[in-house]
Every structure is written in structure tokens, then in C-alpha cells.
Image (cartoon, helix red, strand yellow):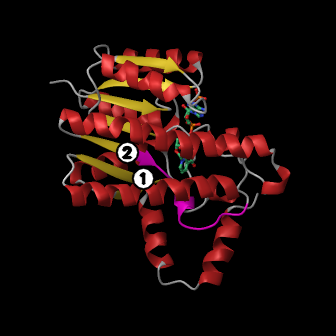
């Protein structure tokens, strides 16, 4: 039977790369993103390569609390979900005091509040249907306080802590639903860094930078082996391992260096 995946932010960057791999596995895709034209364009380009693909997209702002109820209604009308990927998110680069409070609060709304609301809305529906997987996209910035991305990193720390704890709770209770957390390092080939006004920040060209395609491949490897958490990119995995044995001042210095403009 055809499996259905709802991917927030499926029409761009990591979401789009993952979408193509899921299509190759025979999934039917539901997308929610902000920009209707971008959805139409991304859908068309995938259909050119995969003429039999089933992709439907809706333009909605996940910062609007009503959007989640509308997505539930849509997905249930399509027969429910096998996979939910909470991928939509954005960053705004700069010292916190220099940023508009509204911009920071919008990051909290989309990256954290909407992800939580989507997870809470779809989890019981998946349990009632007998199973499913929820993939929540965090970031490597979830591991350390990150100057220049203070609120962004804090939203991703929320995603990581919440998703990891929820994953354990579901496992302990014998739930048929599993939650996987994904922590990508900086991705060099998505619009994220331009949208965040962070194009010239060192991390996007450093040793640990990765691509949307690599992130999508690592997500699916983790999905296939039943991982609860995936750090994407081999260089970042090595760096995170070394970080466990590194003194805090060194980690702080490296983080500050990585998040400065070149
Ligand atoms: N790129 C990186 O370096 C990096 C590193 C670690 C983690 N991540 C995380 O990975 C995820 C995907 O990022 P990406 O690099 O693929 O960036 P991207 O290409 O900018 O994709 C973000 C997607 O989220 C959607 N989105 C943003 N705000 C939304 C809203 N209010 N309502 C609905 N959809 C919204 C965007 O829709 P529109 O395109 O229609 O605006 C877009 O499709 C994000 O959660 C990001 O935080 C990225």
C-alpha cells in the first residue's frame, strides 16, 4: 500500500531533497510551506523527473495556530499519515538585542511551537491507526548556546530535548509510533543562510558544512535503522564525538569562531 508523508517545508532545501528520496521509495507527499509559487515550481520540477509522483502542496503559515487543525483535516481526508517530517523552520542571524522582538518570536512560533503542535496533533492519530514515524528537524546548534543565533539555537535545543524525551516515553509505553530527531550541521546549498542574513558566516563554508542531499541520505539511513537521533555529515559526527572530551572554554571558543562573519 502507498505510504503517505507530510513534510513541512517540503518545497525547499532539505525538505525538497528528502521529498525526492521518499518519492523514489514510492511515498505519496503532502507539503506545507509558505510560498504558493515555490510549491508549484518545486512540484513541477519533481514531476518532470518522476512523472507518476503524487505530490500535493498547501501554502500556509505555520506561525498561525489555526494551520495545524487545517493540516490535520487535510491529512485525515487523504487517509492519514505514515510519516510526518517537521522540517519547516528558519533562522535570523545577529546579536539578539539587534533583532526585532517580533522576528525572534516568529522563530519560536514556527521552529518550536508549531513543531510541538504538529507532533501532538498527529501522534494520537498515528497511534490509533497502528503506527507511524515523526521526524523532527533540530540542528547541531541544539547542543551548545550559539552567539549570533541565540534564539534560533534555543528553539532547536527545545526541539532536540522535547523529541528525544518523547521518543523515550513512546518506547517505554510500547507505542507503535517512533520519533526521530535530526541534527544537521550547516547546510551550504539551501536558501536558509540567505534567508537568515548569514551567507558569510564561517560555519556555512567550514569543514563540517554539508549539503541538503547528504542530510536527506543520512535521515533515511537513520529512519531505516530505527535511530532515535541522527547527526548528519561525517565530519560533524566526528566533531560532536570529540566535543564530549573537550573542555567547555574550547567548545565556547570554537562555537564563537564558527558563528562569526568571515
Ligand atoms: N540550512 C542549514 O544550515 C540548517 C542547519 C541545521 C538545521 N536546519 C533546519 O533544517 C530545516 C530546513 O532548512 P533548509 O536549510 O532546508 O531551509 P529552507 O530551504 O529555507 O527551507 C525552509 C522551509 O520551511 C518553510 N517555512 C519557513 N517558515 C514557514 C512558515 N512560517 N510556515 C510554513 N512553512 C515555513 C519554507 O517555506 P517557503 O520556502 O515557502 O518560505 C521552506 O520550505 C529548518 O528547520 C532549519 O532550521 C538547517
Which residue is denoted by mark 1 in the rendering? 182
Q: Is residue 196 visible?
A: no
Queried whether the magenta region covers residue 144, the answer comes back as yes
- The secondary structure type at the circle numbered 1 is strand
Query: Residue 127: image x %, image y %?
Result: 24, 39
Q: CA distance from mark 1 to mark 2?
A: 7 Å
Mark 1 and 2 residues: CB-CB less than 8 Å, in contact?
Answer: yes
Query: Residue 252: image x %, image y %?
Result: 65, 75
Instruction: Give the residue displayed 24% in from the left and 32% down from the top.
Output: 25
Q: Is residue 183 left or right of residue 168?
A: right
Confirm if mark 1 falls within 8 A of ligand 1. yes
In the image, the segment drawn in magenta is 135-147
Query: Residue 58: image x %, image y %?
Result: 49, 18
Q: Is residue 65 visible?
A: yes
Quarter of the view holding residue 216: top left
Q: Which mark is residue 60?
A: none
Q: Is residue 55 left or right of residue 1?
A: right
Quarter of the view holding residue 111: top right
Which of 23 and 36 lies nearest the eye of the viewer? 36
Q: Is residue 114 left or right of residue 124?
A: right
Instruction: Give the residue displayed 63% in from the left and 66% down from the top.
Output: 145
Amino acid at each position: 500500500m502507498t505510504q503517505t508523508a507530510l513534510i513541512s517545508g517540503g518545497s525547499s532545501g532539505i525538505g525538497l531533497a528528502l521529498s525526492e528520496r521518499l518519492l523514489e521509495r514510492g511515498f505519496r507527499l503532502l507539503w506545507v510551506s509558505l510560498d504558493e509559487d515555490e510549491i508549484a515550481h518545486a512540484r513541477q520540477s519533481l514531476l518532470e523527473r518522476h512523472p507518476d509522483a503524487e505530490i500535493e502542496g498547501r501554502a500556509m503559515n505555520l506561525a498561525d495556530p489555526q494551520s495545524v487543525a487545517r493540516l490535520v483535516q487535510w491529512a485525515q481526508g487523504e487517509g492519514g499519515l505514515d510519516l510526518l517530517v517537521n522540517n519547516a523552520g528558519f533562522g535570523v542571524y545577529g546579536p539578539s538585542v539587534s533583532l526585532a522582538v517580533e522576528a525572534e518570536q516568529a522563530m519560536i512560533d514556527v521552529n518550536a511551537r508549531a513543531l510541538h503542535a504538529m507532533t501532538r496533533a498527529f501522534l494520537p492519530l498515528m497511534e490509533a491507526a497502528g503506527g507511524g514515524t515523526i521526524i523532527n528537524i533540530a540542528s547541531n546548534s541544539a547542543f551548545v548556546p550559539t552567539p549570533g543565533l541565540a534564539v534560533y539555537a534555543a528553539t532547536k535545543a527545545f526541539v532536540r530535548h522535547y523529541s528525544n524525551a518523547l521518543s523515550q516515553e513512546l518506547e517505554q509505553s510500547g507505542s507503535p509510533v517512533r520519533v526521530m530527531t535530526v541534527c544537521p550541521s550547516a547546510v551550504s546549498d539551501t536558501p536558509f543562510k540567505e534567508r537568515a542574513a548569514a551567507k558569510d558566516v564561517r560555519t556555512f563554508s567550514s569543514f563540517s558544512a554539508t549539503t541538503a542531499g547528504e542530510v536527506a541520505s543520512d535521515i533515511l539511513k537513520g529512519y531505516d535503522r530505527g535511530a532515535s537521533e541522527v547527526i548528519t555529515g561525517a565530519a560533524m559526527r566526528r566533531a560532536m564525538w570529540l566535543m564530549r572530551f573537550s573542555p567547555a572554554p574550547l567548545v565556547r571558543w570554537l562555537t564563537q569562531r564558527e558563528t562569526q562573519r568571515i
